[in-house]
Image (cartoon, helix red, strand yellow):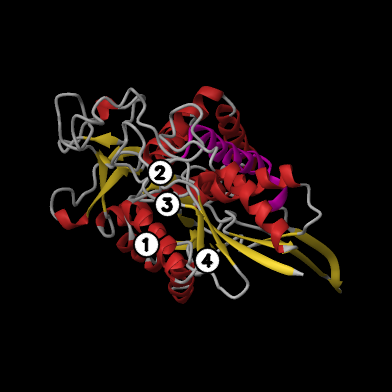
Amino acid sequence: MMMQACEILYRKAAPAHHHALLARTARPFASAAHFKHDAPWLMSSSGGNDDNSNHSVPVVANLINGRFQLPQNFGSDSSSKIPIIDPSSNVVLSHIHDNHTADLQAAVASAEEAFPTWSNTPVQSRQRLLADFAHLLHEKHVREEIAYWITLEQGKTMGDAMGDVWRGLEVVEAAGRAGRDMLGDSLQNLANGLDTISYRVPLGVCAGIAPFNFPAMIPLWMFPLALATGNTYVLKPTEKAPSASLLLAKHLHDLGLPPGVLNIIQGAKPTVDGIVTHPGIRAISFVGSNQAGEYIHDVGSRHGKRVQANLGAKNHATVMMNDADRDSTVKAVVGAAFGAAGQRCMALSVLILVGDLEESQSWMEQLVEEAMKLKVGNGFVEGVDVGPLISKDAKTRAESIIQQSIDQGATCMLDGRGVVVKGYETGNFLAPTVISLNQQQHYITHSTD
């Protein structure tokens, strides 16, 4: 028996500058007036919504106490400004300010003030609000608007972005039935004259730290369940694609969520540092890389918080036996490897073919043929399968892995470097790539941060 391993360096689904984004080739930035949908969280430096006469890059607001507002340190420290970039063109769409002091304090204070009333709101009322939220998200036009911002800022195809929202919706539906999970226990006559009763009660202010690869789904893993069970919340969305979270929060407030129950704060590591050490935050949820997750769990735990950290998930390899159905298997492997550009924890990176070497080579050739059918481009364009990587650094890193593999003796059967997408020549595009190793070689391991 011979074994052949194939390392698959993945590609992702891209954002497309919808024709509504008029400035994609005219300027290296866009004002809020150039977006397809209204965005009350995009503000000018004067504090109002950005308009067509203001050609500065809009600022992404925080959501504190039910209101979108500019960061309190706005304009005081240019080093804290982080650009949000359309990965299909590298146009700067907006920017955030890394709020790790006054704004975080205000968000937590707002959540603390709202907690007594919200936690004493009957569970049926909380569930009903979440059920209304789920019903709203079932409206296709609502999901399409959320998906628009995901595709624009993160780069997924619209199909992938719609799936992102749908998977989050499923958790919102579960949150609408959370009451039964809050039931306590009782036992009579544990001893003479002694009965025991236990209650499950809300913790207080909780926080969530979300990654870039699922801008809607993962925040929807977090705050709906926390709110349904009577907690208040401070969410830090990804600094690369925050708009989906802000739009979700807007919809929830429009349905009647009281001010202060859900707050959203922008930022990067300094903001994370503030969250994991803030004495007012009782629990933290995190999804992301090993390095960040271990840090958040360690520091948060040492500061007395309950921390659930989902980190480092990876679909490391698939072992393919020689009696597998070839056509359906090849299609499944290509979808698993290159869907969402591999920027998801279950993306397949290594395929191990077991059996005759000549037959394995035939499998590889069919795999390459199928991967070559995938269309690379802007995620708004119909028929596109693979969009841009999230950043220039991500593209550079992936290309360096390809070259390093080749330098160490691997055979690059399909090289996706150098792909050019017409109209988006400056985008972070990398086409599907397949690298073949023999049994004497090894593949290069890298984290999926």
Q: Which mark is residue 388?
A: 2
Question: Is disc 2 surrounded by few (<14), some (14 to 19) or many (20+) residues within 10 Å?
Answer: many
Boundaries of the magenta span: 156-181
Q: Are marks 2 and 3 in contact (CB under 8 Å)?
A: no
Look at the image and tell me in which quarter the C terminus lies. bottom left
Residue occupying image coordinates x 38% and y 39%: 243
Where residue 216 appears, x then y in whole percent?
49, 42
Quadrant assignment, res 267: bottom left
Q: Which mark is residue 234?
A: 3
Find numbered disc 1 in the image and state the secondary structure of the residue it sits on. helix
- First along the sequence among labels 3 and 4: 3
**In the picture shown, does residue 269 fall above or below 302?**
above
Report whether 96 appears left or right of 353.
left
- First along the sequence among labels 2 and 3: 3
Q: Name the residue that disc number 4 marks.
A: 307
Residue extending furthest front? 358
Q: Name the residue that disc number 1 marks.
A: 272
Where residue 134 appears, x then y in whole percent?
59, 33
Report whether 167 appears left or right of 265.
right
Q: Mark 4 and mark 1: span between their CA atoms?
A: 13 Å
Q: Are marks 2 and 4 in contact (CB under 8 Å)?
A: no
Find numbered disc 4 in the image and state the secondary structure of the residue it sits on. strand
Q: Mark 1 and mark 3: span between their CA atoms?
A: 11 Å
